Image: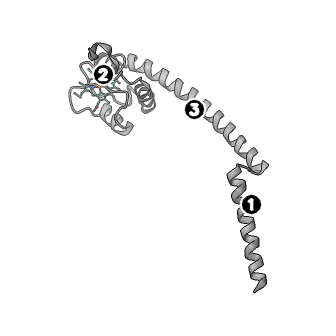
Amino acid sequence: MKKVAMTKRGALFALSVVTICGLLGIVPRSAQAQTTAKAEHADAQAARNDSASAAKIENGKKLFTNDGCYECHGHMAQGGTGPRLGPDPIPFSAFLQYVRHPAGSMPPFTSKVVSDAEFADIYAFISSLPQPPKAKDIPLLNQ
Ligand code: HEC
């Protein structure tokens, strides 16, 4: 009976040590080193992704002009004869479906003319466009 009480107290002690360490932010060194290494890895990965997506956006911008999208949708995809496409474009699957098989007056773009990968870059460009200013941030509209 007494032995059981001791183990319980031991377990309680271990538990409180863990809790206090947790509260004080004390983490064993190896775990800390692992977290730092992981964070550095994630940073490097993010930097690689950033430059990859920057290249995609840049290429998409060129394609948007060279493939003639701008003629109807405007240079910044803001809309013209065709509707505004971005920022916040429709999902990529719907986007791709539309450009391959448009339902209205837009001409179709087959994969012989523009590949899926090229459309992905165009989509990256459209997604990267800055948000237009809010009406309350335009002084002329607030007089
Ligand atoms: C000749 C004019 C014209 C050109 C060139 C053109 N579009 Fe369009 N696009 C339109 C019009 C007009 C619509 C509206 C629906 C319709 O009438 O087909 C449209 C609709 C779209 C839509 C659907 C938008 C939505 O919200 O449903 C997408 C996506 C799109 N265009 C992408 C493109 C891309 C990308 C290119 C270049 C590869 C391009 N368009 C070139 C005229 C054009």
Q: Is residue 99 left or right of residue 48?
A: left
Q: Local crowd at mark 1 within 10 Å, few (<14), some, or many (≥20)?
A: few
| Most foreground residue, 33 or 46 | 33
Q: Position of residue 91 (x, y in %)?
A: 36, 38
Q: Position of residue 45 (x, y in %)?
A: 62, 35
Dot 1 or dot 3, earlier in sequence: 1
Circle 3 residue = 49
Q: Local crowd at mark 3 within 10 Å, few (<14), some, or many (≥20)?
A: few
Decide: is 137 above or below 14: above
Determine the CA span between mark 1 and mark 2.
56 Å
Circle 2 residue = 135
Decide: is 23 above or below 111: below
Q: Position of residue 14 (x, y in %)?
A: 75, 65
Dot 3 or dot 2, earlier in sequence: 3
Determine the CA span between mark 3 and mark 2.
34 Å
Q: Position of residue 80 (x, y in %)?
A: 26, 18
Q: In the image, is the residue at mark 3 within 8 Å of ligand 1 by its beta carbon?
A: no
Which amino acid type is shown beneath numbered disc 2? Ala
Ligand 1: give its quadrant.
top left
Circle 1 residue = 17
Determine the CA span between mark 1 and mark 3.
41 Å
